[in-house]
Image: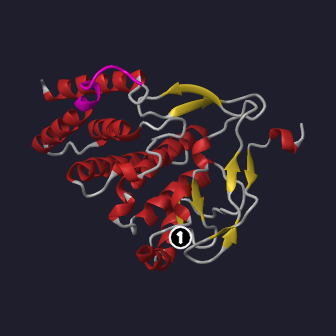
Amino acid sequence: MSEGESKITFWSKNEIICPICGHSFKREELLTGRGRLIAGELTGELRRLYEPSQKYGDVCPLVYPITVCPACLYSAFSYDFETPPGESIAAIAEAEDSRRESLNKIMPDLDFSINRSLKEGAASYFLAISCYEFMPARHSPTIKRGIAALRAAWIFNDLHRKYPNENYDYLAKIFYYKAQFFYSQAVEYEQDGSESLAEVPHLGPDLDKNYAHDGVFYLGGLLEFKFGDKSDPEMRKKRLEFAKRAVARLFGMGKASKSKPSALLDNARSLYEEMSAEAGD
């Protein structure tokens, strides 16, 4: 089998110029078609799983959506990478050493100028979370950090299955907690007008389907239920009530439709029942 027949990615024809440091590089893009992606089940977290193929093996599309400058490690979703807000550029540049040191503590010796593996995929989301910290509210950074954290958790779990003795499950749990925090904030910010979900081109959370606002509210509830703070029972009850109201909006507004598929509605109903059971309703 030739390399051309078995490869799953290609390098962009045109070079990208990093808007932070000026370094030029090519971006690795995922090839589709010819049986590279065999869709499997949809998880309760709205992640689309893929079956390995005999020809291409395991393919994880989530490894590639974040563009990373190999020089300064500035990272963002591809639709944001080349146009960071002007007021954020200096802060992102100044934080380069901090990004590098933080990454090296958990995943040293990565090289973003070569083909990515699961490790680079997880690291790309880690770096994006760091960079979006410096983005203003009009760029909706909170939900973007939430999506990045959730995808990082997924990939760290993938890594744990491949390398069960490397503590990747611990990292997955950390990023689930981060995702819970950011999703919870994003829902609150959407409701009080601080940040708009409508400004984000793809809310995912995965790549196969955009569950849009409904997906954000559902995942906000799910992550609160699974990873929210349980140390204060009274506060836990209040947080669950807030999450329940958000989730109830999904299945309380009619039947399944193209924008509100049955899988999402069914998951939302099940989640609402579980939260109600914990609350003793």
Please give the range of residues in magenta. 248-257
Say which residue appears at 19% left-offset and 37% top-offset: 240
Q: Measured from the top left, where is residue 129 in percent x and y?
A: 44, 59
Relative vertical location of residue 25 with respect to residue 270 in this rendering, above or below: below
Look at label 1 and name its amino acid.
Answer: Arg
Q: How is the image coloured?
A: secondary structure
Q: Measured from the top left, where is residue 53 in percent x and y?
A: 72, 29
Give the structural element (helix, strand or loop) at label 1.
helix
Q: Measured from the top left, where is residue 143 in percent x and y?
A: 37, 52
Q: Measured from the top left, where is residue 238 in percent x and y?
A: 13, 41
Residue located farthest toward the left when viewing the structure as drawn: 234
Query: In the drawing, does residue 125 fall left or right of residue 196?
Result: right
Residue located farthest toward the right when viewing the structure as drawn: 2
Magenta run includes residue 208: no
Quadrant in which residue 236 is drawn:
top left
Say which residue appears at 76% left-offset and 32% top-offset: 34
Say which residue appears at 72% left-offset and 59% top-offset: 114
Quadrant in which residue 176 is drawn:
top left
The majority secondary structure of the magenta stretch comes to loop
Query: In the drawing, does residue 251 fall left or right of residue 60?
Result: left
Query: In the drawing, does residue 22 fall left or right of residue 240?
Result: right
Quarter of the image where the C terminus is located? top left
Residue with the mark numbered 1: 100
Relative vertical location of residue 97 with respect to residue 164 in this rendering, above or below: below
138 or 94: which is nearer to us? 138
246 or 139: which is nearer to us? 139
Total residue callouts: 1
Magenta run includes residue 253: yes
Mark 1 is surrounded, within 10 Å at the Cα level, by few (under 14), some (14 to 19) or many (20 or more) other residues, namely some
Say which residue appears at 33% left-offset and 63% top-offset: 137
Quarter of the image where the N terminus is located? top right
